Structures are given as C-alpha cells and as structure tokens.
Amino acid sequence: MCGNNMSAPLPAIVPAARKATAAVIFLHGLGDTGHGWAEALAGIRSSHIKYICPHAPIMPVTLNMNMAMPSWFDIIGLSPDSQEDEHGIKQAAENVKALIDQEVKNGIPSARIILGGFSQGGALSLYTALTTQQKLAGVVGLSCWLPLRTSFPQCHGDFDPLVPLMFGSLTVEKLKTLVNPANVTFKTYEGMMHSSCQQEMMDVKQFIDKLLPPVD
C-alpha cells in the first residue's frame, strides 16, 4: 500500500495576478485531482490571492473494493458510525499543515490563509483546521463531514473563533460546540447533487473576498 504522503504530483496552482498577500488551499474529493478545482477557482479569483490545489496520493480505498485511486485517507464506510482511518486522517492533516507552513515561509501569514475542500477534501480541511496550532482566516467545507468527530470535546473554552464554513447539518451542530456559533455559516442549494454549482461558487468567492481583502 502506498504511504499516505504528498508524493503525488506538485499541486495545481492559480498564481496571484500581482504580489500574493493571501492564499487559498483547496482539497479535492475522492478519486479526483486538483486540476478541476484550480479551474473553478480561477473563475472566481481575486488578483492578490494565490490558489493552491494539491493532488491526493494514490491508495487502495476500502469503500471502493480496494481499488487504487487518489484519496487523502482510506474510507471504510459512509454511515455516521462507520470505522474511520484514524492514522490516515491524522497523517493527511499533518501533510496539509506542512503545506500551510510552506506558504507561511513564502511570506503569507497563516491568518491570511483559507483552507477549503470538497467532500473528502472538505472533511480533511475541517479536521486540519480544528487540530492545527496555526490561526487560519477560515475554512470552506463543501458537501462534507467532520472526521473523527468523537475525538473533539463538546466544550472548547478558549478556541479561537476561526472557522466560518458551509456544509452538512450534523457537522454544523458539532462545530457550533467547538467554535463561536456566530462564525459558522451553513448554506444549502436546491436541487444540487454531490457536486458544486454557480451560486455556491459565488458564495465561496464572497466568503474568501470578505476574509482575505487586499492589504495594499
């Protein structure tokens, strides 16, 4: 089995049109690559923001009869009480934190970085944001869930109110116990299946532009 590391190809990047003073790191869903999301983000880009869409490593996925495909961690089942790949999720989160560190080294403060993702990538974004020491600008979770949710305490007194997001109602209720409930946004889109839509992408743009305004 392939190790869960970022030995995948280099991320798809939409560079800032001028000096990058903020960044969005966006993680794709199971079986996908970063290219499609880089294209989607290019359509809503702001000139001072760099968009980074990494590719998950290839690994066998239990849910899909052990077929090898791009996956941030193993998925064993889809029900809320399914066993979870705790080691794989934690390792993947460390890899994402390393990506954040790299952008900080490049001169972008973590408070000017938004983490986001779709489906499995959104799940990893939420988990990473809630376990990192880095103070992020926010998180965008599209059509996703919170992994290892029982590992989070119900109360989190001094947790920075750092995660405004959009996604599934159970996840929202859990998040409201972990961060300032006023900072959690949940949006639904009529008729949208497990995909994205123009209105959602415009809401994502509005969210990103609000949290990462130009500094010059």
Image (tube, helix red, strand yellow):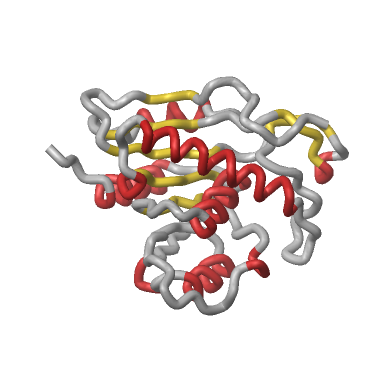
Q: Is residue 105 visible?
A: yes
With 44 as the anchor, is 144 left or right in this view?
right
Residue 25, percent across and down?
Answer: 44, 38
Q: Is residue 79 left or right of residue 121?
A: right
| 202 lies above or below 82 | above
The foreground one among 54 and 191 is: 54
State the residue in front, 169 or 106: 106
Image point 41% across, 60% down: which residue?
A: 163
Judged from this view, the residue extending furthest toward the top is: 9
Seen in the picture, residue 149 relative to 105 is either above or below; the reply is: below
Left or right: residue 24 versus residue 4 is left
* Quadrant of the rendering where the N terminus is positioned: top right
Percent coordinates x, y for residue 22 in the rendering: 29, 38
Q: Position of residue 4 (x, y in %)?
A: 71, 36
The structure residue drawn at horizontal position 57% and vertical position 55%, both measured from the top left corner, is 127
**Toward the viewer: 87 or 163?**
87
Q: Is residue 2 above or below residue 65?
A: above
Residue 49 x %, y %: 29, 34
State the residue at coordinates (72%, 46%).
88
Residue 95, by quadrant, is top right
In the foreground, 16 or 166? 16
Q: Specify the quadrant that holds the C terminus.
A: top left
The answer to which quarter of the image holds residue 106 is: top left
Lateral position of residue 24 relative to residue 46, left or right? right
**Is 134 above or below relative to 30?**
below
